[in-house]
Image (cartoon, helix red, strand yellow):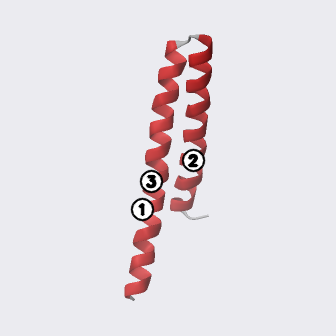
């Protein structure tokens, strides 16, 4: 598996994990868990976007060749 595909998979997982943590934090009133969830969700989204951007760059390079 190429690194960019790993970034997409790991980012998607981390984003989902963060959303769950945020929801659990909200339900239980645990502010720390809620904030951790927001951070993980944001970092996961960023990691996923990096992988997607790398895929797009490779696609464009292949079209130009």
- Looking at the rendered structure, which numbered label has been put on residue 12? 2
User: How far apart, in angstroms, are the residues tagged by discs 1 and 2?
Assistant: 14 Å
The kind of secondary structure element at disc 2 is: helix
The correct choice, above or below, for 21 with respect to 63 in the image is above
Relative to the observer, which residue lies in front, 34 or 4?
34
Residue 38 % position (x, y) = 48, 29
Q: Earlier in the sequence, mark 1 or mark 2?
A: 2
For mark 3, what is the residue?
49
- Where residue 36 sits in the image (x, y, percent)? 50, 24
Give the residue displayed 47% in from the left and 48% down from the top: 47
Identify which residue is drawn at 40% across, 77% down. Answer: 60
Residue 51 against residue 13 in the figure, above or below = below
| Crowdedness near tag 1: few (<14), some (14–19) or many (≥20) residues, C-alpha within 10 Å | some
Using residue 49 as the reference point, say whether residue 29 is left or right of it: right
Give the residue furthest to the bottom: 65
Query: Percent position (x, y) of residue 19?
Result: 57, 33
Q: Nearer the viewer, residue 43 or 19?
A: 19
Q: Which mark is residue 53?
A: 1
| Residue occupying the far top of the picture | 29
């Amino acid at each position: 598996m190429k690194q960019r595909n790993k970034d997409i998979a790991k980012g998607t997982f981390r984003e989902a994990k963060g959303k769950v943590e945020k929801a659990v934090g909200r339900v239980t009133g645990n502010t720390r868990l809620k904030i951790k969830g927001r951070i993980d969700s944001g970092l996961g989204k960023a990691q996923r976007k990096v992988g997607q951007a790398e895929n797009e760059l490779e696609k464009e390079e292949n079209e130009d060749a």
